[in-house]
Image (cartoon, helix red, strand yellow):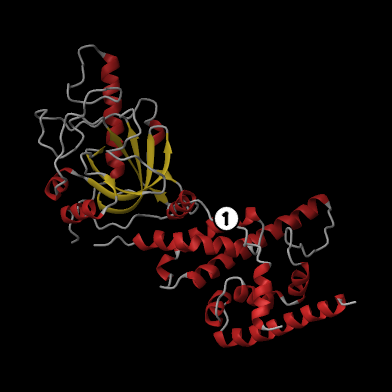
Amino acid sequence: MEPRQTGFEAVAQELIEPLRRYLARRTDAATADDVLSETLLVAWRRRAEMPAEPLAWAYAVARNCLANADRARRRQDRLLVRIWQLARPPEHAPARDDPDPGLARALARLSSADAELVRLWAWEELGPAEIAQVVGLSANAVSIRLHRARRKLKSLLDEQAEGERP
Amino acid sequence: MTDDDLRDRMRRADPAASLRPLPEDEARRLVAGAALDVPAAPRFSSRRLPVLVGAAAVIAVVAGVLVLNGGGAEQAPPPDVALPTSTQAGLENGSGLPDTSGGRLTTTVAPPPGTTTSSAPPATTSSEGRKTTVAVLAEVPADPDVRCRAPEAAVLAERAQMAFEATVLKLEGNVVTLQVHRAWAGEADLVEVRNATGGPVLAGFEPEVGRRYLVAASDLKVMGCGYSGIDEPALRAVYDEAFPKR
């Protein structure tokens, strides 16, 4: 008889690095560490639902955990604002040592949902069906939206390039 | 700009490009930590024992021994009860060998004085308030003169009241804490082994955080002589044979 969890640890070990990269691309290091732990915990609790190809499923878990962490932080920020009367304007925080600020600016001009589709395509190297699993859309809808998002991003980058020409 | 060009530009700006892989130990610790959340180990046991009662019994026995020791000179402990400070060879380590010490008592090894209260079960660890059962095992020094035969399923089945597959979560002083993934016999979510050997060796293996072991215990003492050790197919086969699934 094989123990029921033998598979979980082995699979989870394989997921750790992709999940760390996923989180490093989307949040600060400290939050990434917290959310990674939380993601593994949720994955463990829901291991019965884990599919044979678990990567997209794990990204979806991480995405939810990250959204929860962001919500908690926003609540905390609001509380701080109330207590200290700090008027902090919402800002787009550029990534640390952003190697391509132009790309970051162009991505910021897409809707956050569209930008995420492009990130999942380019950084996580997922296909439409896997992206669909992560973001909870149909594969068809992802294909259409991803196509449009890429087109828009390219045109924004082209515009930048035009503007920079002497 | 083609899609490939776009992807290349995105990849060059990948914030995770410089991320160094996590050390293997740390990855194992993370996974083991997540698994600590488990409400209960899967149980296939045909010989369930209430560990809480067992652990409480150890404490009661220890308390009794201490009281007796302190209370009167004529109340010397039986010669074959291993005390925590004893450096005597522990023939009663549940090794499954022919018992050369003669008729032996079932009294368990006492955890070091002062540590028994901290081990009082049940411990509650989960954020959801689920109970975690802690089995407190002890280990006595092995007799270097004893030669061990290869582990036998029949001996394991006869002697072991507990047989677990477990991952080492932490090492603190002489206490090794293991997360139980599976119980062939007995019942626990966490196992604490108080290592009374004075060395880092636990039943012949060096505990390593994140690593998986098979641990058998007889009378709340870890069985040595190859009956406990790193999770390997040969040892696992002995466990499976000793405790067939019903």
Residue at far front of view: A166
Position of the N terminus of chain B, as image quadrant, is: bottom right
Residue in the picture at 55% in, 76% down? A126
Residue in the picture at 45% in, 62% down? A14
The kind of secondary structure element at disc 1 is: loop
User: Please, what is the three-letter code of the amino acid marked with disc 1?
Assistant: Arg
- Drawn side of residue A87 relative to residue B144, left or right: right
Q: Position of residue B140 (x, y in %)?
A: 26, 31
Picture quadrant where residue A112 is located: bottom right
Residue that numbered label 1 is attached to: B20
Q: Position of residue B138 (x, y in %)?
A: 29, 35
Position of the C terminus of chain B, as image quadrant, is: bottom left
Q: Position of residue A6 (x, y in %)?
A: 34, 60
Residue at far top of view: B73
The number of callouts visible is 1
Closest to the observer, A143 or A50:
A143
Picture quadrant where residue B205 is located: top left
- Drawn side of residue A142 relative to residue A106, left or right: left
Residue count near mark 1 (Cα–Cα under 10 Å), binned few <14, some 14–19, many ≥20: few
Residue B120 in sight here: no
Q: Position of residue B188 (x, y in %)?
A: 32, 48
Residue in the picture at 63% in, 88% down? A144
Closest to the observer, B105 or B180:
B180
Residue A47 in sight here: yes
- Drawn side of residue B147 relative to residue B215, left or right: left
* Subunit under mark 1: B
A127 shown above or below B92:
below
